[in-house]
Image (cartoon, grey):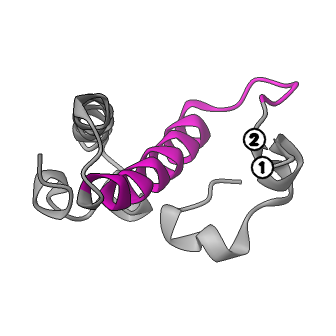
Amino acid sequence: MIYSCRERGNRSERERKMKKDGEEQRSEQPLPADEVLILLTDVLLRYLEQLKDARAAGENSFVYGEQTAYTECLEWIGLWEHAAEHGLDFEIEKRYPL
C-alpha cells in the first residue's frame, strides 16, 4: 500500500511500526521503490519545516547547508512521475527559499 504525504494524519501501520521513541527505524523487509520515495519525501518535508523555525531564529551556516541538501533531494524526487500525487505539487524553492 502506498501513502501520500498528504495522508500524514493517517499513518500506515507499517510506518507506525517503523517509528520507535520518535526515531525513524528501518523496516525488516525491503520496501517497493514508490513507498521509499513517499517515506523519504515525508521525512525531508518534516525536516525542512523544522529548519524554517531554526533559520528564523538565526541559526548558523550548518542549518543553511542542511536546508540546501534537503531541498535538492526533494527537487530530484520531484522528477518522479508520481511526485505531484504524493505531495510535491508545488515549487520547492518557493516554499523553502534558500
Residue at 30 percent across and 58 percent down: it is 57
Front residue of 87/50: it is 50
Q: Secondary structure at mark 1?
A: loop
The residue lying at 39 percent from left, 63 percent from top is: 87
Q: Position of residue 95 (x, y in %)?
A: 19, 63
**What x and y, as percent, mark residue 29?**
84, 25
Q: Which mark is residue 23?
A: 2
Left/right of residue 61 with respect to residue 39 in the rendered view: left
Q: Quadrant of the N terminus?
A: bottom right
Q: Which mark is residue 22?
A: 1
Taking the image as shown, residue 63 lies to the left or right of residue 68, namely right
Principal secondary structure, stretch drawn in magenta: helix
Q: Which residues are magenta?
A: 26-55
x, y (%) of residue 72? 23, 33
Q: Is residue 32 magenta?
A: yes
**Label 2 Cα neighbours within 10 Å, binned few <14 / some 14-19 / many ≥20:** few
**In which quadrant of the rendered image does the C terminus lie?**
top left
Q: Amino acid at mark 2?
A: Glu
Mark 1 surroundings within 10 Å by alpha-carbon count, few (fewer than 14), some (14 through 19), many (20 or more): few
What residue sits 53% from the left and 46% below the top? 43
Q: Please check the rendered image and state whether residue 76 is part of the magenta-colored stretch, yes or no.
A: no
